[in-house]
Amino acid sequence: MAATIIQTNNTPFNKVSIDPVTLEVIENALRNARIEMDATLVRTAMSPGIREQGDAFPLIADRTGQMIVGQFGSYIGPFLDGFDGTVEEGDMIMLSDPYSVGGAISHLNDWLVLLPVFKDGRLIAYTSMFGHQSDIGGKVVGSMPIDATSIFEEGVRIPPIKIYSKGVYNADLIKLIMAQTRKPDWCTADLNALIASCRVAARRVVEMCERFGDDVFAAATDELLARNYRAMKKLIASSISEEKVSFEDYVCDDGMGYGPYKIRCTMHREGDIVVLDFDGTDPQSQASINFFLNENMLKMFFGIYMIMVFDPQVLFNDGYYDLIRVKIPEGSLLKPKFPAALSGRTHALGRLFDIMGGLLGQKTPEFLNAAGFSSSPHLFYSGYDAKGRWFQLFQIGFGGIPGRPLGDGPDGHSLWPGFTNVPNEFLERYFPLVIERYETVADSGGAGLHRGGNGIIMTYRFLAPGTIAIHDDRWFTMPWGVNGGEPGARARKILEKPDGTQIVVGNKLENLAIEAGDQLHFITWGGGGWGDPLLRDPSLLELELERGLVTVTGAKRYGVVLVDGKVDVAATTSLRDAMRAERGPITSVFNYGPDIETLRANSVAETGLPAPKAPVALAHFAA
């Protein structure tokens, strides 16, 4: 059943025309309200993941639930379709279970708060915010067990429930939920921050209606959606061919010895409609790397990629969703069957951005990005400090962003542009550890006319015994290069004991015991390169050598010879001529590096880790 909207005033909104100036004012007021939501959140939340790193996503939607401003696309439609209850003034809804809303949120750690905004008895808008909770119970600290085989191992499941009903707070329900987490202080503060953010935006919406009139506000939201539809329709017509193109990429492993898992997508245009078909994607995993991909979420990914690549001036909202049709096979990695585990879905999520780039760039390689939006590296560290106090850390790391048509990829940056790093001073103040190194890894970005962003090395020295968990990817396959660019370097994780012994550990693991004095070298992947590296300006290599971004040896990948930090012009010309003659002309758009079977054969020698076994279909989820 669908939700029932209860209004005390059912007068329809009048259709009115809106002038461009008023539309611009309302659009920017909504943008500012979204920014104010973020500011309220970081001033109120306690967990490092939200307060320091910004792992939360705001949204302001129109009266039908379509996102007007935000970052993650609207999940309100799937919620309204699946919520068997009423929505009325004074209500506030909370949820976290992906299966209850068709994957509109993607794992249990994301707590979502939704506030319907009423004015004079009529529903005028929705405000919403969801944020990643650092612990929601489950079998491991941090509640993201990579080796979970069902969602019941991952923590408390919250179906859509009212935490406020007609203005009355359900304190007993919140008390029950907080009893499931190892960090109720963080979770309580973070939930209050989500609530406060929604209320701030709701006030701003009401203020806009009072200033301009309800009908004008409604007309403005309608026009912003329609304008986006018109813009995207033109982008699709000019950028997407009726001829089918396909692209595939891989999640390296599932943390339980199997992989890589293929994600395949075929794209074509039928009239005005883009069709994205994931037939050929591997079956769901036994582990938690499954990504229950909501179709609207994919439409959002596709649209924001199109807008950022082809026309960044277009306001991103939900207005264009009718122009995209999505097909995802049931029982696949991207649409697993209940009760498949979902907490490690970040790797497949990141890989979708690489796949979008690979699809959109085949017909227009001049607009093509290399690979590098490849994952969202996580570290978990927990135990008792010297005073017997419990601590637990969840931190998001950064890799290299891909080389692009207009320039190099940023070094050590987040998949999500709004994320920031946790300051080292904060980590050392609140957790028993010391950050010994935090720097880019020279030469890890793929060589190219435009270099892929370097990955980073972050070396943690642990001051208290405990356990760590690691979630990362791109250790087996490489972030591919394009238009002659080379692949980026792979991720590595090395545990160093106090006596100097180094042990290569997996990029997906749980409950690794560590002792005081142990060091973890957390090394992330580099972005793929863009364009022929032999065309890169040699003077840039001088600067990058000085800045520690390349080495003398690495500069030779560009055919550049550096002597005492300066370009040897004659030697560079000679080396580039020899490299061109040996390589021959560039004939392929994509440079993936070795094929999968070659990677398997060389895995131990190149990575220090055994190759994963080929995935198998799961009979117990087949019914």
Image (cartoon, rainbow, N blue to C red):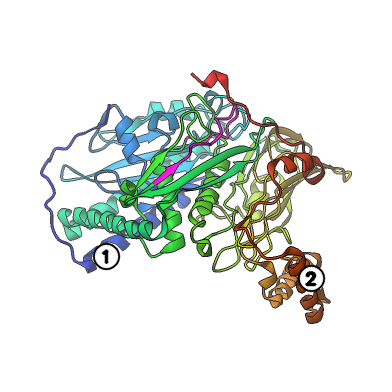
Side (left or right) of 496 relative to 391: right
Residue bearing mark 2:
578
**Percent of width and height locating residue 209:** 20, 55
CB within 8 Å, label 2 to label 1: no
Visible residue check, residue 487: yes
* Element on which disc 1 rests: helix
**Percent of width and height locating residue 6:** 19, 34
**Percent of width and height locating residue 408:** 60, 66
Q: Quadrant of the N terminus?
A: top left
Q: What span is in magenta?
A: 275-292
- Tell me the tag on residue 540: none
**Dominant secondary-structure state across the stretch colored magenta:** loop
Mark 2 crowdedness (10 Å alpha carbons): few <14, some 14-19, many ≥20: few
Query: Which quadrant holds residue 135?
Result: top right
Residue at x 72%, y 58% (from the top left corner):
441
**Percent of width and height locating residue 489:** 71, 53
The kind of residue on which mark 1 rests is: Val
Residue at x 53%, y 36% (from the top left corner):
281
Residue bearing mark 1:
25
- Residue closest to the eye, 1 or 481: 481
Q: Is residue 278 magenta?
A: yes
Residue at x 72%, y 40% (from the top left corner):
597
Eye-nearest disc, 2 or 1: 2
Measured Cα–Cα span from mark 2 to mark 1: 59 Å
Q: Is residue 308 magenta?
A: no
Query: Which quadrant holds residue 484?
Result: bottom right
Q: Is residue 11 above or below residue 83?
A: below
